[in-house]
Structure formats: C-alpha cells, structure tokens
Image (cartoon, rainbow, N blue to C red):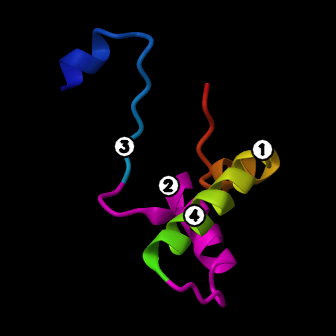
Amino acid sequence: MRQAIAARSWLRVYRLPGYAPELNAAEGVWSHLKRSLANIAVTNIDAMARLVKTRLKQMQYRPGLIDGFLAATGLRPP
C-alpha cells in the first residue's frame, strides 16, 4: 500500500482511527437530519421517505451548513 501511495504524487492519504465519527462530515449531516425529524409523526414509511428527501434537499441548498460539517472535522482539503 505504501508503494502504491508513493507512486501517485497527486494522492493524499490521511490515517484515521478505526472509529472516528468526529472526523466524518457525513456524521454531522445525519445528526442534523435526525434532529430535524425529532418530533414528527408520520403515518407510513413512504411519508417518512418523502420527508427525509425533502430535508436533505433543503440542506443541499445551504452550502454554509455543509461547509460547517466539513470544517468541524478539522481536516483541510488541499
């Protein structure tokens, strides 16, 4: 693996611990989504799926929110 990494100068590899949710921006997205669904009663699974899709779509149009999830990891892209 080290040879494969060394052969590709464009490749950046970050060594992360086995379980580190604080370094995974997706964890912030799911946490935010779950909080937004906390006190909602739905009648069936289709209604829940529509609601989740709607909430994810709303998050998509808030780039500052997504940037915040990435910044919270402390990792900086090149």
Q: Is residue 14 above or below residue 69?
A: above
Give the mark nearer the N terminus: 2 vs 3: 3
Tag 1 residue: 63
Reading the image, the residue beneath label 3 is 15
65 to the left or right of 53? right
Query: Which amino acid type is shown beneath numbered disc 3?
Result: Arg
Q: Secondary structure at mark 4?
A: helix
Question: Which secondary structure lies at badge 1?
Answer: helix
Mark 4 residue crowding within 10 angstroms, few (<14) / some (14–19) / many (20+): few
Looking at the image, is mark 4 or mark 3 nearer the viewer? 4
Disc 4 marks a residue whose amino acid type is: Arg
Mark 1, mark 4: which one is toward the viewer? 4
Q: Which of pointers 3 and 1 indicates the residue nearer the eye?
A: 1
Q: Up-down: is 60 above or below 20?
A: above
Q: Which residues are magenta?
A: 17-43
Q: Provide residue 58's location: percent of width, then percent of height.
A: 74, 55
Q: Callout 2 environment at 10 Å: few (<14), some (14 to 19), or many (20+)?
A: some
Is 54 magenta? The answer is no
- Queried whether the magenta region covers residue 30, the answer comes back as yes
What separation in Å lies between label 4 and label 2 (alpha carbons)? 25 Å
Q: CA distance from mark 4 to mark 3?
A: 37 Å
Q: Are marks 2 and 3 in contact (CB under 8 Å)?
A: no
Disc 1 marks a residue whose amino acid type is Pro
Kindly report which numbered mark, 2 or 3, lies closer to the viewer in this rendering.
2
**In the image: residue 1, left or right of residue 69:** left
The residue identified by callout 2 is: 24
Q: Earlier in the sequence, mark 4 or mark 3?
A: 3
State whether residue 13 is above or below residue 33. Answer: above
In this rendering, the label closer to the viewer, 4 or 2: 4
Residue designated by label 4: 50
Residue in the image at 44% along x and 25% along y: 12
